[in-house]
Image: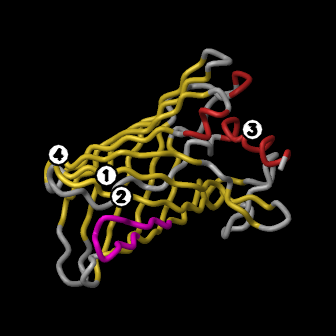
Amino acid sequence: MKNIWIILTLLPIFGLYNCAPSRFVEPLDKGEVSVGAHLGGPVIDFGAPIPMPITAIELGYGLDSNLTLHGAWHTTAAIFGNFQIDAGVTFKLLNQNKYRPNISVNPGFNFIYDFNDKAAKFWPTVDLNAYWNYGQRRSYFYIGFNNYFELSKTKANDQTQTDHWIFNPQIGHIWKTKSDKWEIITELKFLAPYKDNSYAFIPYTSLTGKNGANGFYLGVRYKLGKN
C-alpha cells in the first residue's frame, strides 16, 4: 500500500494525473441536474495490472436539450495538497439515424493548483465522441478522442516542452437503470499511445506495448430531476 501512495504522489510529474473519463457524452435534458463520482486512472503493473485509485465527484446541468454544463472536483488530488477541477460543456452536434451515431463535442479545461509549491497549471481540453443508444433504456456505447493542450513552453527542470497536444482515444459504455435515475459508467482510455513509456519510473501497462498507457475508469451518476 505504501508503494501505491508513492506512485500517486509522482503521477503529476508524468502528466497522467489529470486524466478522467469523458464527461457527459450524452447531454442531459433541459433543466436536469445530475451528480456522480468516478474511480480509476492509468493502469500499472503492481504484481498484476491495476488501475490507479484516482477519484473525483462531478455535477452536471442541462442548459438545453443539446447543451450540458458540467464540472468536477478531483478528490484524490486534494489528499496530496492540490486543488484540481475540470469543467466544460457538452454539445450534441448530430442525432443518431439507424447506424449513424450521435455526435457530441466537449470543450473544457483542467486546472490544478499546488498549495505546497504555490504553482498552478491550466490545460484546455476537447473531447469528441460518437455514441449509439440502444434498447428501451437508451443505454449507449461510445468511441471518441480526448485532447489535452499543453500551454507551457518548458517541462520540469526547464526542459523544452515538445508535447503541446496530448491525444487520448477512448471507448466506453453507459448503462441506464430501469428508473432512468442511475447510470453506470465504464471507460477504457488509451493515454498518449504514440509515446514511449519504457523510460518512465511508473510501471505503466499498455495494450500497445511500450507506448503510452491504458486508463480504466468506473463511475456512477444519479439524476436528481429537473429544476
Q: Residue at x 51, y 35 (%)?
A: 150
Q: CA distance from mark 3 to mark 1?
A: 32 Å
Q: Looking at the image, which is closer to me, 17 or 157?
A: 17
Give the mark nearer the N terminus: 2 vs 3. 3
Position of residue 58 relative to residue 80, above or below, is below
Q: Looking at the image, which is closer to me, 63 or 210?
A: 63
Using a 10 Å C-alpha cutoff, classify the residue at mark 3 as few (fewer than 14 neighbours), some (14 to 19) or many (20 or more): some
Mark 1 sits on what residue?
34
Q: Residue at x 28, y 69 (%)?
A: 180
Locate residue 67, reporting x and y percent: 19, 50
Q: Nearer the viewer, mark 4 or mark 3?
A: 4
Q: Nearer the viewer, mark 3 or mark 1?
A: 1
> CB under 8 Å between callouts 4 and 2?
no
Mark 3 sits on what residue?
10
Mark 4 sits on what residue?
63
Amino acid at pointer 4: Leu
Question: Could you say whether the residue bearing mark 2 is in a helix, strand or loop?
Answer: strand
Q: CA distance from mark 4 to mark 3?
A: 38 Å
The magenta stretch is 174-186
Q: Looking at the image, which is closer to me, 199 or 126?
A: 126
Q: How is the image coloured?
A: secondary structure
Amino acid at pointer 2: Tyr
Q: Is residue 158 left or right of residue 66?
A: right
Mark 2 sits on what residue?
222
Give the mark nearer the N terminus: 4 vs 3. 3
Locate residue 227, reporting x and y percent: 15, 46
> CB under 8 Å between callouts 2 and 1?
yes
> CB under 8 Å between callouts 3 and 1?
no
